Amino acid sequence: TTCNTANDLDAALPNHNLADTLKAHREHCSKLATLNNQPSRELVIDLLANAKRRADQQRFDDAVARLYRAIEALAQWQLHQQHQLNASAVTLEQLPPSLREQWCDRATPNKPLKLALQDDYQLLKEQGDDLGKRFFKLELDSNKSPLSARNASILAHGYQPVSQKSFDALWKVTLELARIEPKNLPVWPQLPSY
């Protein structure tokens, strides 16, 4: 029966090497299962692949929300991996002096700061981290940033539907920020439509 099922799948998905595709997806899912929902490169890759699938379905609001989360997770992972900082619990003492002074009014005694996306990248930049520098070089902090499409969407703070053009702009800079090639993202086989 397994042979017949495999043959049926090969016939239904002629543009995929099914054995290699399944092996790659099993490895990817195994890595994700061990992460306990902690930011990681694998999680960023999964979010990017998911965003692309949503965009292909014309679900641009969902796609942009996933790109936003991928950008945020990328910074959180970098802070943890390279600087031993938890973006959800940063104390003033862990901050560089320039940020300590700037953010001291946000801190409450005996309670660490929980950093937002822009804060994560500001901290990375102040640490001299290349990812933080790249975020600002790509002008993701500006009012013209493609990130603003997410903030104006119904899934965040606004009422504007996200267009394909907005998705495309954020997709491009997200891949550049993460230094990930689209060809390296997992692709789920699609049954042909008739």
Image (cartoon, rainbow, N blue to C red):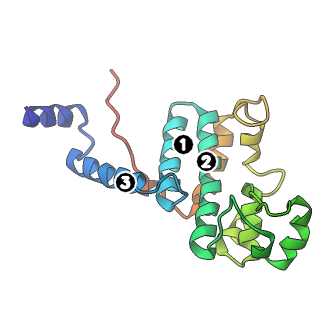
**Residue 28 - label:** 3
**Residue 67 - label:** 2
Quadrant of the image containing the N terminus = top left
Q: Is residue 178 above or below residue 61?
A: below
* Quarter-of-image position of residue 99: bottom right
Amino acid type, residue under disc 3 in the picture: His
For mark 1, what is the residue? 51
Of the two numbered discs 3 and 2 in the rendering, the one whose residue sits closer to the viewer: 3
Taking the image as drawn, is residue 140 in sight? no
Residue located at (23% from left, 44% from top) = 18
Quadrant of the image containing the C terminus = top left
> Percent position (x, y) of residue 141?
79, 58
Q: Is residue 116 above or below residue 13?
A: below
Callouts 3 and 2 close, C-beta under 8 Å? no
Residue located at (55% from left, 37% from top) = 55
Callouts 2 and 1 close, C-beta under 8 Å? yes
Amino acid type, residue under disc 2 in the picture: Leu
> Percent position (x, y) of residue 168?
62, 45
Secondary structure category for the residue under label 2: helix
- Distance from the alpha carbon under mark 3 to that under mark 1: 16 Å
Callouts 3 and 1 close, C-beta under 8 Å? no
- Distance from the alpha carbon under mark 3 to that under mark 2: 19 Å
Mark 3: few/some/many CA within 10 Å (<14, 14-19, 20+): some
Amino acid type, residue under disc 1 in the picture: Ala
Question: Is 137 positioned to the left or the right of 56 in the image?
Answer: right
